[in-house]
Image: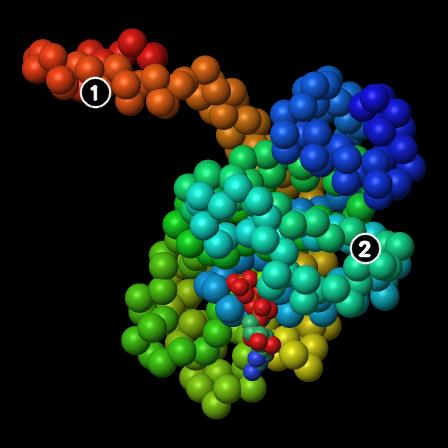
């Protein structure tokens, strides 16, 4: 079955892509064989869009899709639903707002659940991204809410990471999560229709200054998502980052990071957490001398 889907997927058939994503999400029969058979797409770029809840990420993605297709590109969007780590199905609700493009032939939009990966991305996001690339999309945009683990994961997944923020009072920026600062290839200050936007950008520049010694200067783009103001600049910043990093060492490091995560996942696969819990419970009930390290060593 997957062989046929793969053929169709490579022709850009979205139904085959949708089925293949479900196959991989559910670890259904044949999914590993299919992943092993995927062709390499050297030119597709993964753009991570992250930032606090409600910062305007989806609004910006919607506007960006318009830019990409105006430049003749095919673009796919994967929205990772952040709502709850215990939520086992993607809740479309909010994400449906991007529906402007749902029927455009060069656009593919899919919501993914987090499926219990604590505050993180969908556990199969790396593999799903590879499927989408194989379907011939030039850009794969992954939207995630920047909370906890997910920002580190998105930095490993994306060729270009865009961090979206909104202008807040001076103190807020000081307390902004260091995690978000570190992963940004591009900063977006959205909702810059707010009066405090210029002061916020200035503060952000000052904060970033000490980091300049070893890295490239991180561009800061001011946008108003709802009016698409600044979207040209954002598009250009993404294109420029792609050109700068496309053939660099960074690319190999990124792929190393993805492989590392896959290996980690597979090694952890055999570990039955419930079994572990039961074993710990009975150890504690028996009032034995419980040694944490010795216990853990059984699983090494
Ligand atoms: N004033 C103003 N409102 C905006 C702007 N961009 C987006 N919004 C509004 O902000 C709200 C949140 O926008 P979304 O695009 O859903 O934000 P998000 O970051 O995707 O939200 P989550 O996915 O829930 O984290 C919506 O009501 C938008 O209309 C902007 O530039 N200015
Ligand atoms: Mg959103």
Q: Is residue 143 left or right of residue 295?
A: right
- Name the residue that disc number 1 marks: 281
Q: Nearer the viewer, mark 1 or mark 2?
A: 1
In this view, 229 is above or below 239:
below
> Could you tell me residue 221's position as x and y percent?
59, 72
Q: Is residue 32 left or right of residue 113?
A: right
Question: Which mark is first along the chain, 2 or 1?
Answer: 2
**Residue 38 - label:** none
Q: What is the crowding at mark 1: few (fewer than 14 residues within 10 Å), some, or many (at least 20)?
A: few
Front residue of 142/291: it is 291
Q: How many marks?
A: 2
Residue 275 showing in the rendered view: yes
Q: Residue at x 63, y 25 (%)?
A: 27
In this view, 173 is above or below 107:
below
- Name the residue that disc number 2 marks: 107
Ligand 1's quadrant:
bottom right
Q: Residue furthest bottom?
A: 195
């Amino acid at each position: 079955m997957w062989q046929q889907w793969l053929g169709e997927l490579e022709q850009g058939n979205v139904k085959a892509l949708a089925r293949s994503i479900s196959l991989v999400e559910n670890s259904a029969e044949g999914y590993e064989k299919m992943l092993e058979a995927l062709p390499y797409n050297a030119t597709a770029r993964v753009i991570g869009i992250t930032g606090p809840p409600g910062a305007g990420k989806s609004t910006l993605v919607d506007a960006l899709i318009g830019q990409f297709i105006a430049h003749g590109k095919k673009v796919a969007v994967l929205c990772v639903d952040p709502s709850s780590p215990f939520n086992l199905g993607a809740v479309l609700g909010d994400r449906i707002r991007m529906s402007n493009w749902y029927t455009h032939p060069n656009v593919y939009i899919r919501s993914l659940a987090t499926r219990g990966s604590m505050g993180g991305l969908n556990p199969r996001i790396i593999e799903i991204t590879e499927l989408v690339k194989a379907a011939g999309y030039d850009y794969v945009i992954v939207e995630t809410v920047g909370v906890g683990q997910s920002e580190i994961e998105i930095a490993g997944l994306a060729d270009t990471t865009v961090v979206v923020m909104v202008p807040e009072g001076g103190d807020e920026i000081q307390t902004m999560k260091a995690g978000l600062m570190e992963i940004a290839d591009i900063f977006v200050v959205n909702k810059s229709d707010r009066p405090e936007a210029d002061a916020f950008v200035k503060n952000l520049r000052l904060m970033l200054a000490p980091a300049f010694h070893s890295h490239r200067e991180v561009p800061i783009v001011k946008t108003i998502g709802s009016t698409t103001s600044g979207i040209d600049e954002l598009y250009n910043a993404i294109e420029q980052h792609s050109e700068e990093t496309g053939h660099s060492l960074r690319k190999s490091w990124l792929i190393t990071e993805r492989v590392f995560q896959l290996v980690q996942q597979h090694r952890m696969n055999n570990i039955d957490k419930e079994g572990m819990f039961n074993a710990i419970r009975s150890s504690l009930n028996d009032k034995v001398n419980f040694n944490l390290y010795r216990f853990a060593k059984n699983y090494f």
